[in-house]
Image: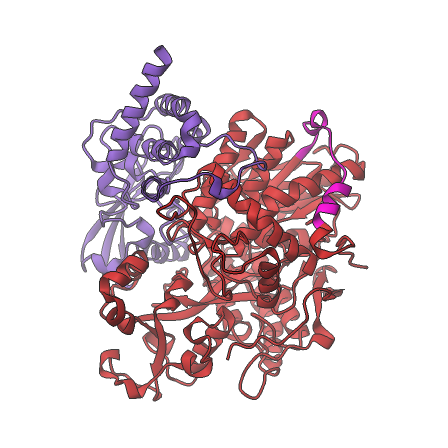
Amino acid sequence: MILDAKVPPGPIAQKWDQHKFNLKLINPANRRKFDIIVVGSGLAGGSAAASLGELGYNVKCFCFQDSPRRAHSIAAQGGINAAKNYANDGDSIYRLFYDTIKGGDFRAREGNVYRLAQISVNIIDQCVAQGVPFAREYGGLLSTRSFGGAQVSRTFYARGQTGQQLLLGAYQALCRQIARGSVKMYPRTEMLDLVVIDGHAKGIVVRDLITGEISSHAGDAVVLATGGYGNVFFLSTNAKGCNVTATYRAYKKGALFANPCFTQIHPTCIPVSGDHQSKLTLMSESLRNDGRVWVPKTKGDQRSPDQIPESERDYFLERKYPSFGNLAPRDIASRAAKEACDQGRGVGPGGLGVYLDFADAIKRIGEDGIRERYGNLFDMYERITGENAYKVPMRIFPAVHYTMGGLWVDYNLMSNLPGLFVIGEANFSDHGANRLGASALMQGLADGYFILPYTLADYLATSKQAKPSVNNPEFKKVEQDIAARTKKLLSINGKRSVTSFHRELGKLMWEKCGMARNAAGLHDLLKKIPALRADFWENVKVTGQTESLNQDLEAAGRVADFMEFAELLVRDALMRNESCGGHFREEYQTPDGEAKRDDEHYAFVAAWEYQGEAKEPVLHKEPLPYEEVHMTTRVYK
Amino acid sequence: MNLTLRIWRQKNAADGGRLVEYPVNDVNPDMSFLEMLDVLNEQLIARGEDPVAFDSDCREGICGMCSLVINGIAHGGFRGTATCQLHMRHFQDGQTITIEPWRAKAFPIIKDLVVNRSAFDRIIQAGGFVSVNTGGTPDGNAILVSKDASDHAMDAAACIGCGACVAACKNASAMLFVAAKVSHLGILPQGQPERERRVLNMVRQMDAEGFGNCTVTGSCEAVCPKEIRLEFIARMNRDYARAVLKARS
């Protein structure tokens, strides 16, 4: 298989404009003849469904939550990047493009990233017009702030709830289309499989989570906007319901899965408090602007932090990376914290934490100054830990936060399966091996509002496919497969709960395929994961029936897919014999412990093709030629 | 900690439902309330019983999916805290805790503690938006918004649509929810062209869904996890009166 990214020729700044002109259009009167299926209602799915509805397509949108307003985009705190250069500090589209490519450790596709930077400016305009209450200056203009990995102030924000406000903007646009009848919304409905007919994506099979009814939906195109797979680690900052099922099912139907080993670990999360932990909570990265990260110099120091004198503290980020200090990028800060804990110098329960200390900042600008900047975060920290971070240092630890990998897509955001489009976190295209802060919201909305409506029309206009129908026997076959799988899950009636399997899988993945990986550990996982999976299918206990709301059954289906997907992630990590971005292989590091990239052998996108049960997937490589940006080593010392 | 839970169990919408008592032992004070229920569910599954159905997703207080009435108070009664951020250290060893779903005619129970809040979506569909299509919008800085207006709008826009305001209200009124959206958009310049039709249509839909009227007891404000203020209801009433008068003239 030859992977054609279909990046248009010509100078990088003109590619998208020229391409938009070349794309075929659909006459407004003909649009209503096309049925489009959108799965997911977050920033990407919600904005896509609304925009396609406005254009006149007949859209069906699905989400597993009780309302499209609850998708996990809502939890994003910090902000959204845009190359507006309102701050007059030297920002430009080219600079945002460059920062994103470099931040991604040179594993993203240049053409896509440049387009993302171009579109970033339109997103802000769109959201302002919708009534998103962005922060303002006294003069009434939009306010911006700076964020990790950038030297300019280009991040727009709405308090610490930027994701919520952008999502509500998209949700409200979607609601307007639902009222018009151009979008039909299916909440509490979960996609369980993709239907492919004659090589083209032609629909999905879903389960109504209230009644348990399995039904088919045919469409001229299918758009997956189903988010990332961070919950393969069980504990992550993702919502409880986030899962890999939609994208993994598409992979099993022939879509290629790209770079699954590129996972992002966020350095500032609240540490695990015990075995009961069900998820992890992120504390905004902005805290590192004023907090100082440290651990005791001596191993196993049990004194309370106020009893440890200055001379016996190790401010390890400031020591190791004097020029960036506490603002070192996410991947680097996370690894440094892990290293300190591995040396036995971690703090808090189990020694899995480091201090984030605001004492100096409080001395400098006072407690009120800190409260003004981060009050809501300090409150949230206290709600969860019961500790007052104005008096004692916060404890933080890295946690899985975002996944850069996803289904492979070309420049048109279409997977190798014609008619299957993948947008937002669910695709792989823009963040390379590491995503910069405030770029996820930008990508989700760029894909949904401004890219997909153009490229989808071109597919519909040029593919000349017959109108799909749920009467096609392929739909029946997929429905039967799902019914059989559900029946199997309910009939095992073993001894262990679904959660206990998920927790065990997550622990294995975190220990051996988390912040640091090595070949021996990964080989070990390739033995342990299949064994755990076999145990799952023999010993899992799923209660209840299929004909009603059954949260245990929902979880079982998702965990079953994670059990298979985990193996793919590990295989990808084992194949990639280099360290880059969020993927750190211990064998490939410099003498002082920094990541060592191998551009000669690994400057490619790894796209995996499913071959069938118990068969190894086949690797396809999309080379990443860098025509604009010169590949350099990321240095933050 | 050892606790006794009295939990509302109801098979489906047609079932009558009842409170069932469950002892839960060895609860860690650092657990969140929902993690404590996870522990109970693990025990129920081990015994082959149907686990308690309850809604949750983000578990960090922003998605608005979680929805429990704990000892008679929506979200448990800790200021600015949704159920998912409530931790067990606030409870005492040996305590009995009663857990019920949101109760309102417009929020029918689906199963156990899970209710149907789609009425909220239909209220937003009736007018809780600014009618702009994708593309063709002016530069973000072409629309000036004073910092005060932006902050004020944000106070209202922070609503997570959880429905606690309805659950807490003796009339099951949705006024705080509706007022938050009417105010968010009504304060900003972007929302002015549709200000009258928005409030009329949203209030009409709110009434059609079967929510009760507001008698300004303030219980909604007291339980709101985002601390949305009662003043927005006053603001909506004013907007509504203005719209009605304008429509007549």
Depth check: give the residue in front, A270 or B41.
Answer: A270
User: Quarter-wise, where is residue B92 in the image?
Assistant: bottom left
Residue B16 seen anywhere in this rendered image of the structure: yes
Q: Quadrant of residue B163?
A: top left
Tell which residue pokes out farthest to the top in this image: B249
Residue A248, compared with residue A419, is above or below; it is: below
From this view, report whether residue A407 is shown above or below residue A184: below
Chain displayed in red? A
Q: Is residue B109 magenta?
A: no
Q: Position of residue B207 (x, y in %)?
A: 34, 22
Which of the two residues, A430 or A537, is positioned nearer the viewer here? A430
Q: Is residue A147 above or below residue A305?
A: above
Residue in the image at 39% along x and 68% along y: A288
In the picture, one chain is purple; tell me its letter.
B
Q: Is residue A371 left or right of residue A255?
A: left
The image shows residue A189, relative to residue A281, as above or below, that is above
Q: Is residue A27 magenta?
A: yes
Magenta range is A16-35
Residue at left offset 55%, top offset 41%: A47
State which quadrant residue A131 falls in.
Answer: top left
